[in-house]
Image (cartoon, rainbow, N blue to C red):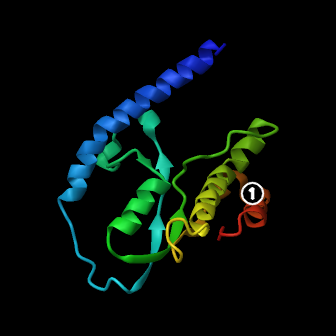
Amino acid sequence: PTSPDARDAMDQLLKQRETWLAGQAKLEAWHAQTREEALEPDLEIVDCHHHLWDYRQLMGYNLLGIFKQQYYLADELVNDIVGAGHNVTRTVYVEAHAFHGKDGPDPETTAKLAPLGEIFFAQGVAAQFASGQYGANVRACAAIVGTADLQAYGAGIEPLLEECVRRCPNFR
């Protein structure tokens, strides 16, 4: 049997999905307002700054109108890369404070190493693209830019950086 907490969590996810789906048509209409032809469709392009996120828990809340969508992951990235007609061959992932890790031996270590979760996530997306399934020459997250709270941890942040370099080859 499913626990009440698990049922509540699933109900919340379903509500988040409904909210996201309701906003999807508006997003697609917004995108359709401007279509452009690629001026040099054979020119290789590196998208030097993109994010991936899942902020469905915001339930449609849109701070300052900056989020046109609250869910942007590999499928949406593929649609943008393939659907735009440009020859995007590489992308650079820049942290979005999404998918931070929640596991750790104690609260301070968990907080200090939390950004590692996002780096793992981006490296996983890189692995999806490295499979060649989205194009033989397309490599999303070919470089990954992370974050570290130097103000809070100073030189104590070194274990996070070492783990990022050791475990995620695309981390820069």
Q: Position of residue 140 (x, y in %)?
A: 53, 67
Q: Quadrant of residue 24?
A: top left
Towards the viewer: 55 or 115? 55
Residue drawn at x 55%, y 23% is 9
The answer to whether residue 70 is visible is yes
The answer to whether residue 61 is visible is no
Q: Is residue 155 above or below residue 105?
A: below
Q: Is residue 10 above or below residue 127?
A: above
Residue drawn at x 64%, y 61% is 123
Pick the quarter of the image with the C terminus.
bottom right
Q: Position of residue 163 (x, y in %)?
A: 77, 60
Amino acid type at circle 1 is: Leu
Residue matched to label 1: 160
Q: Is residue 1 above or below residue 143?
A: above
Residue drawn at x 44%, y 60% is 77
Label 1 neighbour load within 10 Å: few <14, some 14-19, many 20+: some
Pick the quarter of the image with the N terminus.
top right
Towards the viewer: 135 or 77? 135
Q: Quadrant of residue 106?
A: top right
Q: Secondary structure at mark 1?
A: helix
Residue drawn at x 72%, y 49% is 113
Query: Is 137 left or right of 17, judged from the image as shown?
Result: right
Q: Position of residue 67 (x, y in %)?
A: 35, 48
Q: Position of residue 104 (x, y in %)?
A: 77, 40
Query: Is 103 left or right of 96, judged from the image as shown?
Result: right
